[in-house]
Amino acid sequence: MQDLPGIVITGASGRMGQMLIKTVVESDKAKLVGVVEREGHDWVGRDIGEAMGGAPLGVTVTDQALDAFAKAQAVIDFTAPAATVQFAKLAAQARAVHVIGTTGMTEDDIAQLAPCARHAVIVRAGNMSLGVNLLTKLTEKVAAALDEDFDIEIIEAHHHHKVDAPSGTALMLGEAAAQGRGVALSDVADRGRDGITGARKRGDIGFTAIRGGDIVGEHDVLFAAAGERIVLRHLATDRAIFARGALKAALWGQGQKPGEYDMLDVLGL
């Protein structure tokens, strides 16, 4: 047990945070060595097992991220963009693998990760599941095979608590489609339609975001032309798939050279 990689989970009280903690605790390939919450949170100072309503796990929730990171080989982070940027700097100081599942990050946020990646491994992905990453590769290949007679729409659905739209996965799929077409997504993305918008622009990649209930995650990539449609779909019914993928990334990062990676690297795709 002592030789297993130590993992720290940030955002411990969130739904993904708790799922990640459960996944690490149940794994025989890693051990939980720290959990982090924001300053002032009522879980700080409590045993994480008890805070989650279960038996003690011997790990106390802290708001001192660097102290926690210094004891770990990897940090798994599904929080918010501003927090993730700061965690990246601290993970780099600790030379810990930083697995980032945070969505809603801007280009500026992402740019701030580059200096950190000179000192530590960063694995960042809009979605950590095997199925979605396979869907990403399929989307790129189909987009490359079809011309602009086929309109591309990314349709995603999530629970009503999700705060960003389009989802990180939808944007990842859009990037794949754009790459297949040999264009920049920023030049062809259509992320909102309301009112009299005019006809659809040829070559655009459209996004539609649905929010409701407890939907874990549903993503369709629609290729639509006159007389035919192709739909690539991934349905997630349990967010444990994201936690398992994140842990796989944390373990894969051990021994890798500092740099920025994604789940396609982890999965060898």
Image (tube, grey):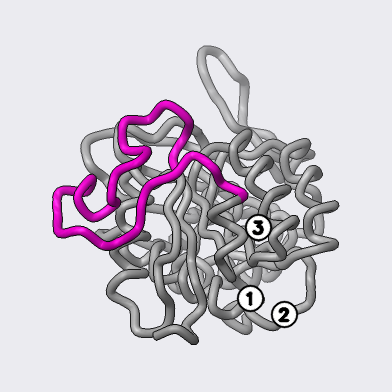
- Is the stretch drawn in magenta largely helix, strand or loop? loop
Q: Nearer the viewer, residue 205 or 254?
A: 254
Of the two numbered discs 1 and 3 on the same chain, state the one appearing first in sequence: 3
Residue depicted at 49% across the width and 39% down the height: 63
Q: Secondary structure at mark 1?
A: loop
* Nearest-to-viewer mark from 3 and 2: 2
The boundaries of the magenta stretch are: 37-66
Give the label, 1 or 3, closer to the camera: 1
Residue 256: which numbered mark, if any?
2
Asked if disc 1 and disc 3 are in contact, CB closer than 8 Å, the reply is: no
Can you tell which quarter of the image residue 125 is in? Answer: bottom right
Q: Where residue 175 is drawn, which disc sits there?
A: none
Task: Find the residue positioned furthest to the left.
Answer: 54
Circle 3: element type: helix
From the viewer's perspective, is 141 left or right of 133? right
Tell me: 256 left or right of 118: left
User: Which residue does the numbered mark 1 point to in the structure image?
Assistant: 253
Q: Is residue 211 above or below residue 122?
A: above
x then y, percent, for residue 159: 30, 39
Does residue 28 appear in the picture of this structure?
Answer: yes
Classify 175 as above or below 191: below
Pointer 2 and pointer 1: residues touching (CB < 8 Å)?
Answer: yes
Rendered-image quadrant of the N terminus: bottom left
Real-space Cα distance between discs 2 and 1?
Answer: 5 Å
Mark 1 is on which residue type?
Gly
N-terminal of the pair, mark 3 or mark 2, is 3
Image point (51%, 78%), residue name: 5
Q: CA–CA distance between discs 1 and 3? A: 27 Å
- The residue that disc 3 covers is 177
Residue 169 colored magenta?
no
